Image: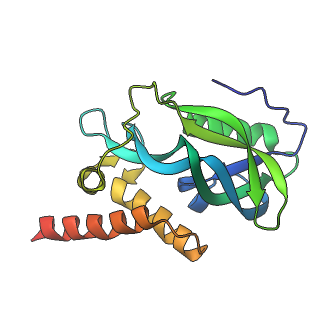
Amino acid sequence: MLQNIDTSQPLWVFGYGSLIWHPGFPVEEQAVARLTGFHRAFCMSSIHHRGTPEKPGLVLALDAAPDAQCDGLAFRVVPGTEADTLAALRERELVSAAYVEEIVTLRLHDGRAVNALAYVIDPGHVQYCGGLPLEEQARIISAAHGGRGPNCEYLYNTADHLSELGLADPDLDWLAARVRALIASDRR
C-alpha cells in the first residue's frame, strides 16, 4: 500500500539494510536511529535483486514484533528532491509489492523523534519467509545471485556498515561468517 506522502514537507527515510550503504538519493542529514515494534530479518525471498524466481535469495525486511527494536540510519532528504526521491524509492523497493510503505516514528541518537518512511514486509505476501533457521538462511545467501549481484555481497555490505556504525547485529555477524565459510568450502 502506498502512503500519501506530502513531498512539500521534509522527508525522512529509515535505512536498515541496503539503504544504509547505498541510499541512492541525495541526503541532507543522517543520524543513527531506533525503530521499535520491528526487527531486521532476512524474511523476504528475493526474486529480482539478489536472486531469481528459479533460485531465490534473501533480503532484509522490517518484520513486526511487539517487543522488537531495530537500529539503523535515518536520512533526511535534500530539500527540493523529495518527489524524485520518493519516486526512485518506490521503483527500487516496491518492485514486487512484498514491501509496504509505512510512516514510522524513529528515535534519533540525539533524542529527537522524527516521522520517517520505512519499507516493511507484508507477512501475507508470497515472498514472506520469516522464521527460517540461520543455517538455512546462510545456505540460501551463499548460493543466490540476482540482478544487483551476489546475495552474499548484500549481506556483507550490510553487516560491515552496521559494524562501522557501532550497531551490533549478532545474527548478521554470524551469517556473514557462516556464508564466507560455506563459499570457501564450495571453492575447494
State whether residue 95 is above or below residue 109: above
**In the rendered image, the vertical position of residue 163 relative to residue 38, given as above or below:** below
Quarter of the picture containing the C terminus is bottom left
**Nearest the camera: 67 or 137?**
67
Res. 29 in view: yes
- Height in image: 164 above or below 52? below
Residue under the image location 42 percent in, 63 percent down: 172
User: In this figure, what is the number of numbered marks?
Assistant: 0
- Which residue reaches farthest left? 188
In the rendered structure, the answer to whether residue 21 lies left or right of residue 126 reads right
* Residue 33 percent location from the top left of the image: 70, 60
Q: Is residue 97 left or right of residue 43?
A: right
For the residue pair 98 and 78, the one nearer the viewer reads as 98
Q: Residue at x 58, y 69 (%)?
A: 167
Q: Residue at x 57, y 76 (%)?
A: 164
Q: Spot the residue most to the right.
A: 8
